[in-house]
Image (cartoon, grey):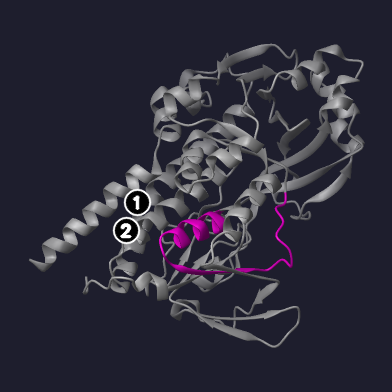
Amino acid sequence: MGTVEPGFKGTFHITIIGAGLAGLVAAIALAKSGYKVTILERDGELREWGAGIQIPPNCAKVLRQIGILDQVRARATQPRTHSVLSYKSGATLSKQDMIPMIEAVFGAPHLVIHRAVFQRVLVKQVETLSAINIQLGAIIDPVLSDCARGSIRFSVNGSETKEVTTDLIIGADGERSMCREILLGRPDPPKPSGYVAYRLLIEGSKILEAPEPSVHGLVDDPSVNVWQGPESHAVSYMLDGTLNLVLFKPSANSNGGASSLKPELVGGEELRSQFVEWEPRIQALLKLATDCIKWEILETEELKEWVHPDGHFVLLGDAAHAMLPFLSQGAAMALESASFLCHLLSKAMSPTQIAPLLHIWNEQRELRVRKVIEGSKTMGRFWHSPNTAGLPEASRPKNVLADPQFQMWLLGYDVGEDAQKVSEGFQNSSLSSKV
């Protein structure tokens, strides 16, 4: 595996393409391990699209490992309960206490937070690390770049093309990933999954003024609520005084229909017409909506290989493994993968160990991510099938989150412990090969 080179990390240059959550977490962890890091971000300013994001305990452990869990927790909401409700009557179908159970059982809290707030915490941490340089407005030329050999050509604000030569490229540019297409050597755009989502942000003060009294409890009680409906479901939770409500329906693209795949602003009337038979609390909330964001839930082809054979170029997060949102684990899997990768690279004793560690990381993470992707698809079928009482047991969509073993495997997972075991095995095998 090569000779030991103490201090090589200080001159080993890693470039991360994309300053989303996964890219920022990777940059922080790598810089704290001694690596020199450059982030190339297409946007001219750091911004995170979307609204609420759930941080389950397996994800919270990643934040603890890079030293920012307390900062995130101080700006987040910790839901008290998780309830599944009937779309028609609003009756509680199941309810799970989250405080203190989640942290006591799984070793970390379950939090909800606005994506932009989460990103600001990460950016603030990045700004304290001199080993990280961020270049905003970097438009990468996929034709002139040779990522497999560590060469990136880009321009900034229409300037002349610049070149960065780097030892490792991490493509963390999301589900609409250019890096993914470069690695595959062909176009591979994301495709409609058959689901569309509507997102509303409603001020808690407006909800408390609504004439429907039953809706007031959604503000007073910081909980995650899921309404299970026919081919549809809705999720709500509070974000620092604002209710985040997302409703999912079948999409016109379920049958290959053509529509824009980009988020769009639509009027409240379109949304209300889709949920006319839902319970009074949903109706009251939708009456408060003048408009909302509508977008297609996208899927990408599942990849087994996230690492270029030459070992200088890898995909991370949604660029490698975008998934449906029905387990609330998309960001968690991206951050787990980032943490696992950075932990292994922190144990490298020479540049020659980097490529073998990348391939080990790929093999280890792909197994877990694949199972979560399948679990997310299963939960999508469950959430959208409320009337299954007359179906044979084998035909009923499964609630994988009701399985205690799956819960512990998913939420109790500690990526740091797992990565440590793998890195120790790698180092032991490296030492044995030299004997």
Split into 4 quadrants, where in the image is the C terminus?
A: bottom left
- Check disc 1: other Cα within 10 Å, few if <14, some if 14-19, many if 20+: some
User: Which residue is disc 1 drawn over?
Assistant: 364
User: Range of the magenta residues?
Assistant: 22-49
Q: Tell me the quarter of the picture where residue 213 sits.
A: top right
Residue 418: within the magenta?
no
Q: Is residue 41 magenta?
A: yes
Q: Secondary structure at mark 1?
A: helix
Of 51 and 31, the residue lying toward us: 31
Q: Is residue 304 above or below residue 62?
A: below
For label 2, the SS is helix
Residue 214: image location, x then y, percent: 81, 13
Q: Is residue 90 above or below residue 418?
A: above
* Quadrant where the N terminus is found in the figure: bottom left
What mark, if any, has residue 360 been given in the picture? 2
Q: Position of residue 325 (x, y in %)?
A: 60, 40
Q: How many marks?
A: 2
Tell me if 51 is positioned left or right of 5 in this view.
right
Q: Position of residue 268 (x, y in %)?
A: 90, 36
Question: Answer yes or no: do the residues labelled 1 and 2 have beta carbons within 8 Å?
Answer: yes
Q: Amino acid type of disc 1?
A: Gln
In the drawing, does residue 340 fall left or right of residue 324?
left
Gap in angstroms between the C-alphas marked 1 and 2: 6 Å
User: Which amino acid type is shown beneath numbered disc 2?
Assistant: Ile
